[in-house]
């Protein structure tokens, strides 16, 4: 039997690369990847956080997740690009379409990551290393952005390999290469070793992945329970989950939130913010062919006090107006008139939309669902701003807000990968 060969494809600085590529294709002369720039928040209000950064921005110690205000204090000339989530989905899908030409076994791991099972495909595409370079170069030439590709015998090592030197590189990490390539890395570089786990390991003088690999697993079990054994196995490159192709995985939920450009203290404005959030959430539901059975709202006051409220609904839905009406009811039950600086909407308990059971006791939203679907087609083709509700004219609010592609919409790597 041929040994398993797994590719992990990871887009370099995905959000920023996709935005830069799009602007260049539209005739912009400046490549955002060559200057200090970030994607995140609102460039006009300068609210929000950094979602992605260029390599030149790293020289200013700008970090993903920090506030735009903090990033601008480090680099006043920083270019801020507003996130375009529809574009990001399209770029992600375009990448997946190319990868499907090389293997029937493709697993999307996140919006900018894919696993490809290349086992035995060398007879069709040649040496895996050469094939990876062909794929990498094809993505660069046809789509305009770069990827790193990691190659190994399992998903864990392939993912670790793709994290080596960037951008636009192909790396291998086979079992015989682990002592040289992986063990010298800081312990925090190992997958599934987060900040808290890293601190626990460092306190025990376990500083590198090699230190972890050479630690008695009984000590790790005592300190970290089953997670200690998991990361000990990972330090040795032990992982055997298959690449799982097929349709969408079971999603727990989808949600959006936004920091408001000004404190909202009027009910009508708050309802408009909820609608702008629901517009994006419901569009994602329909795009991924889901219905929601639970709606939740949350908000944070100007005093940074947070509140949330949720409701199970009697029948599944993906209708924008229906979800918005429920969100408004939840908000009205919860809000006491405080000025608001942050609001969010979330839907969960999702099910596939291949069957809809109508009820005699609720309003029929079927006509509105058809309108939603027509609007989705227009926005998909001409952009999210191609059609909007008149209630947003002169409101100072955006017609569609948020749209972060939550990682939970994709199969996250766990002990089972």
Image (tube, grey):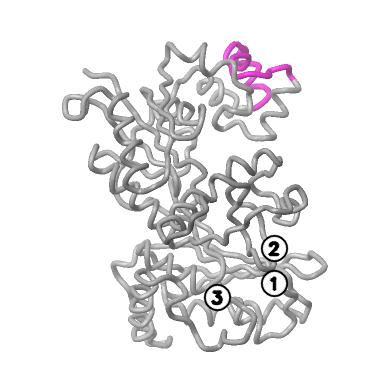
Q: Inspect the magenta stretch and tell me whether residue 214 lies in it.
A: yes
Q: Which residue is mark 2?
A: 47
Neighbours of disc 3 within 10 Å: few (<14), some (14-19), many (20+): many
Q: Which residue is mark 3?
A: 276
Between the residue at mark 2 and the residue at mark 3, the CA separation in whole angstroms equals: 17 Å
Going by the image, does 236 lie left or right of 212?
left
Q: Inspect the magenta stretch and tell me whether residue 282 lies in it.
A: no
Mark 2 vs 1: CB contact within 8 A: yes
Going by the image, does 69 lie left or right of 249?
right
Image quarter where the N terminus lies is top left
The residue furthest left is 124
Q: Which residues are magenta?
A: 204-224
Q: Secondary structure at mark 2?
A: loop
Neighbours of disc 2 within 10 Å: few (<14), some (14-19), many (20+): some
Of pointers 2 and 3, the one earlier in the residue sequence: 2
The numbered dot on residue 261 is 1
Between the residue at mark 1 and the residue at mark 3, the CA separation in whole angstroms equals: 14 Å
Neighbours of disc 1 within 10 Å: few (<14), some (14-19), many (20+): some
Of residues 202 and 358, the one drawn nearer to the viewer in this rendering: 202
Mark 2 vs 3: CB contact within 8 A: no
Q: Which residue sits at x=55%, y=75%?
A: 276
Q: Position of residue 129 (x, y in %)?
A: 32, 24
């Amino acid at each position: 039997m041929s040994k398993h060969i797994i590719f992990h494809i990871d887009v370099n600085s995905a959000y920023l690369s996709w935005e830069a590529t799009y602007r260049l294709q539209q005739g912009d002369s400046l490549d955002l990847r060559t200057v200090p720039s970030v994607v995140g928040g609102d460039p006009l209000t300068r609210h929000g956080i950094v979602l992605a950064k260029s390599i030149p921005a790293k020289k200013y110690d700008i970090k993903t997740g920090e506030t735009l205000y903090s990033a601008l204090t480090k680099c006043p000339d920083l270019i801020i690009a507003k996130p375009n989530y529809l574009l990001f989905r399209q770029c992600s899908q375009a990448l997946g379409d190319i990868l499907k030409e090389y293997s029937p076994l493709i697993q999307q791991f996140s919006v900018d990551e894919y696993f490809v099972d290349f086992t035995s495909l060398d007879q069709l595409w040649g040496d895996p290393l050469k094939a990876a370079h062909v794929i990498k170069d094809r993505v660069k030439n046809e789509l305009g952005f770069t990827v790193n590709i990691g190659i190994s015998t399992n998903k864990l090592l392939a993912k670790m390999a793709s994290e080596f030197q960037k951008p636009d590189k192909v790396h291998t990490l086979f079992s015989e290469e682990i002592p040289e390539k992986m063990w010298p890395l800081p312990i925090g570089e190992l997958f599934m070793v987060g900040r808290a786990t890293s601190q626990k390991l460092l306190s025990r003088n376990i500083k590198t992945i090699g230190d972890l690999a050479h630690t008695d697993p009984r000590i790790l079990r005592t300190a970290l329970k089953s997670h200690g054994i998991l990361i000990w196995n990972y330090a040795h490159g032990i992982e055997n989950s298959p690449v799982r192709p097929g349709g969408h995985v079971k999603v727990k939920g989808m949600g959006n939130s936004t920091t408001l450009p000004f404190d909202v203290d009027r009910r009508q404005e708050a309802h408009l913010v909820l609608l702008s959030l629901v517009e994006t959430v419901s569009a994602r539901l329909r795009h991924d062919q889901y219905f929601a059975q639970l709606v939740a709202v949350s908000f944070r006051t100007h005093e940074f006090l947070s509140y949330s409220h949720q409701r199970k609904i009697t029948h599944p839905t993906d209708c924008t107006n229906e979800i918005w009406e429920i969100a408004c009811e939840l908000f009205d039950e919860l809000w006491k008139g405080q000025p608001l600086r942050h609001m969010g909407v979330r839907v969960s308990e999702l099910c596939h939309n291949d069957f809809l059971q109508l009820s005699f006791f609720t309003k029929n939203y079927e006509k509105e669902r058809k309108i939603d679907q027509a609007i989705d087609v227009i926005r998909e083709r001409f952009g999210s701003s191609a059609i909007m509700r008149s209630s947003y004219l002169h409101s100072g609010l955006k017609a569609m807000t948020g749209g972060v592609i939550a990682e939970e919409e994709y199969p996250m790597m766990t002990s089972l990968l």
